[in-house]
Amino acid sequence: MLRDRPDGVLHAHVEDAANLAAHGRFDAAVGFECLHDLPHPQAVLTAMNEATGDDGIVVIMDEAVGDEFTPDTEGLDRVMYGFSLFSCRPDGLFHRPSAATGTVMRPSTLRRYAAEAGFAGVDVLEDGFGFWRFYELVRA
């Protein structure tokens, strides 16, 4: 977590993302390629929502996987399924209970998590950025 302090110095803290709001208000909160690994992504998104208030920005960057599952998928989705089975999903399952999202987090899954965290929607900011897709979580 980074926060601009009144003394003009930018401080970094290692913190559970679900505790973000305990440190005050922020102009923005971003999650880079992490949400699919978390056992409780909705709690982290809720904390990001609370910490940024009505006028803050919340951006999530995650793998640019397909919009839906298809059995004959190619390229990126195949690689992501491998990562999901052997790395990300087992990591998320280490803490129980767990959302067990895994690397292949579809946009519909992020929309559901965002709604559960109190956001009105999700806009794709950048799609076609190669390996990554950027989302802005929208308030009501």
Image (cartoon, rainbow, N blue to C red):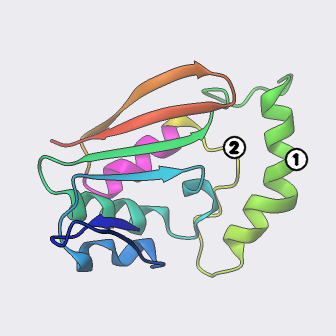
**Mark 2 crowd level (few <14, some 14–19, many ≥20, 10 Å Cα):** many
Please tell me in which quadrant of the rendered image residue 43 appears: bottom left
Read off the magenta span. 108-118
Counting from the top left corner in percent of width and height, residue 17 is at 43, 71
Q: Looking at numbered disc 1 in the image, what kind of residue is underneath it?
A: Gly
**SS at mark 1 in the image:** helix
Which residue carries the number 2 mark? 104
The image shows residue 45 at horizontal and vertical percentages of: 37, 59
Viewed as shown, does residue 131 lie left or right of 83?
left
38 shown above or below 58: below
Neighbor class of circle 1 (other Cα within 10 Å; few <14, some 14-19, many 20+) is few
Q: Nearer the viewer, residue 97 or 18?
A: 18
* 109 falls in the magenta region: yes
Q: Nearer the viewer, residue 40 or 12?
A: 12
The C terminus lies in which quarter of the figure?
A: top left
* 27 to the left or right of 86: left
The residues tagged by marks 2 and 1 sit, at their Cα atoms, a distance apart of: 10 Å
Identify the residue at image location x=50%, y=37%.
108
Residue shown at 52%/44% (left/top)? Answer: 109
Give the left or right position of residue 122, taking residue 119 as reference: right
Provide the major secondary structure of the magenta segment.
helix
Q: Which quarter of the rendered picture does the N terminus lie within?
A: bottom left
Residue ID at (34%, 56%):
116
Any magenta on residue 136?
no
Residue 97 drawn at (x, y percent):
58, 79
Extreme residue toward the top, this view: 128
Residue 129 horizontal/vertical position (percent): 60, 22
The residue pinned by badge 1 equals 82
Amino acid type at mark 2:
Val
Residue at image location 13% in from the left, 46% down from the top: 55
Quarter-of-image position of residue 12? bottom left
